[in-house]
Amino acid sequence: MNIRRRLADMLLMGLTYACMCLTIGALLLLIGYILARGIPYIKPGLFSLKYTSDNVSMVPALLSTVMMTGLSLLVAVPLGVFSAIYLIEYAKRGNKVVAAVRITAETLSGIPSIVYGLFGLLFFVSFLGFGFSLLAGALTLSMMVLPLIMRSTEEALKSVPDTYREGSFGLGAGKLRTVFRIVLPSAMPGILAGVILAIGRIVGETAALIYTAGTVAQIPTSPMQSARTLSIHMYALSSEGFHTNEAYATAVVLLLVVIGINALSASIAKKISRR
């Protein structure tokens, strides 16, 4: 029996390491391919402030990506976090409404992005009259990442021990003070992890933004103007067929932007957890 258990353990350990190596190898292969195809074509013209058909600058798309991400998180993070706080801290356990909200959130998280784009086109662009704009795209993306932020915040709040709450109540603190001074800071690393995943989805989204934000290659001066993000810029260059090499160069910049945002968010999470 011991020999069989050891053989089974060794087999499972070998499968685990094999899957790990396969995943890391595929990731390194993908990153290496993008870097090899894109780095040679990164040139000063790609960083001009104004886009033309000659330089195909990515700066307007880069700034639009930052604006789109910030505006989307400005809408989605407060709604997702406060909704999760109500579901975990205030709603009664076993409530049918809470169960319905959670099922709805899980269902929304599995809907393809093209469906969100069509909804944004019908509701934000046409019905509300926002047109193809930064605001319409940001509202659509906030709907996409809202279930992700809600679920990650719920799990982070559940991971906080009940002894923290009981200790706070024992010292005379009220419910609101306990939630925002004890529970929420303890759950902040988990909440930021969900926000990091939301940022990754926002930055890499293309289908939903084509129908809502448009593809105009300019720096938007107001939320009601059309704009293209880096992912849309890369898609437009590759689909036209004239600037495929510049599309790979844009992919390199997009990869660096995502890595930089994740590293910054991770460092913030570590500082908050230490405090």
Image (cartoon, rainbow, N blue to C red):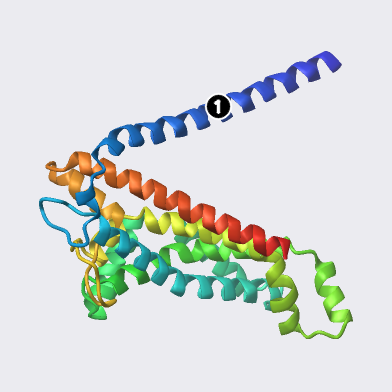
* Image spot of residue 270 (x, y percent): 65, 57
Q: Position of residue 111 (x, y in %)?
A: 40, 57
Q: Furthest residue to the top?
A: 3
Amino acid type at image mark 1: Cys
Residue at left offset 79%, top offset 15%: 4
Look at the picture and state if 124 lies above or below 241. Answer: below
The quadrant of the image that shows the C terminus is bottom right
Q: Identify the residue at horizontal 46%, vertical 52% (top origin).
A: 260
Residue at image coords 35%, 32% = 33
Closer to the camera in the image, 132 or 151? 132
Coordinates of residue 91 in the picture (x, y in percent): 67, 77
Relative depth, front residue between 147 and 104: 147
Spot occupied by residue 149 in the image (x, y as percentages of width and height): 53, 64
Q: Is residue 1 visible?
A: no
Q: Secondary structure at mark 1?
A: helix
Q: Residues within 10 Å of mark 1 (few under 14, many from 20)?
A: few
Q: Is residue 221 left or right of residue 149?
A: left
The outermost residue toward the front is 44
Residue for point 52% across, 61% down: 195
Q: Which of the pair 28/35 is nearer the observer?
A: 35
According to the picture, the residue beneath numbered tag 1 turns out to be 21
Displayed quadrant of residue 114: bottom left
Q: Name the quadrant of the N terminus.
A: top right
272 vs 1, left or right, is left
